[in-house]
Amino acid sequence: MTELTMGVSWLAVFVGAGASFLVGWLWFSQKLFGTKWAEGSGVKLGDANEMPAGAMALQIIGLLLMSWFVGVTAVSSALLTVTLATVAFTVLAYSGGMFSQKSKYARGTEAGYWIVSLVIMIISQGIFRGM
């Protein structure tokens, strides 16, 4: 278990996850990609009060886990490992979107969000790792 916690900057983990969550809020909003993404995903966009609480909670947990993974690989100088893993899971999610018949735009929007989240988390590690 120590390999998953030793030297990890928890500040960087939480900042990376939190910043990614906030970017996601904007990313999937009507101001950016949300309207066309929703059409291509077969969902109805609502206001903040209509967001499914369970999905939001799982999103936060998933982002924390991903950011922790970035932190573990940053400590061991293996950021290419987390990059490879994120690209692999992004491709798998993209193919899942094809199975569920999401539009190409919706799949691309989701894939772009995961790559941007990874970049945010890596930058957070660079800024906050020593703290």
Image (cartoon, grey):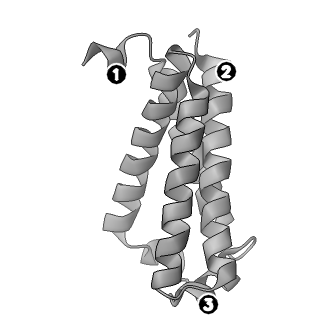
Left or right of 64? Residue 86 is right
- Residue that carries the numbered disc 2 in the rendered image: 126
* Quarter location, residue 40: bottom right
Front residue (pair 35, 65) = 65
Q: Please tell me which residue is depicted at 49% across the width and 63% down the height of the picture.
A: 92
Mark 3 crowdedness (10 Å alpha carbons): few <14, some 14-19, many ≥20: some
* Quarter location, residue 119: top right
Q: What secondary structure is marked by label 1? A: helix
Q: Please tell me which residue is depicted at 46% across the width and 46% down the height of the picture.
A: 63
Across and down, in percent, residue 7 comes to 44, 10
Q: What secondary structure is marked by label 3? A: helix
Mark sitting earlier along the chain (1/3): 1
The three-letter code of the residue at mark 3 reads Glu
Task: Measure the C-alpha gap from mark 1 to mark 3.
Answer: 39 Å
Across and down, in percent, residue 14 comes to 48, 32
Label 1 vs label 2, nearer the camera? 1
The three-letter code of the residue at mark 2 reads Gly
Looking at the rendered image, the quarter that the N terminus falls into is top left
Looking at the rendered image, the quarter that the C terminus falls into is top right
Mark sitting earlier along the chain (1/2): 1
Note whether 124 is above or below 43 in the view shown.
Answer: above
Front residue (pair 56, 50) = 56
- Residue that carries the numbered disc 1 in the rendered image: 4
- Residue that carries the numbered disc 3 in the rendered image: 39
Note whether 64 is above or below 76 in the view shown.
Answer: below
Mark 1 and mark 2 in contact? Answer it, CB < 8 Å: no
Left or right of 5? Residue 63 is right
Mark sitting earlier along the chain (2/3): 3
Across and down, in percent, residue 42 comes to 52, 90
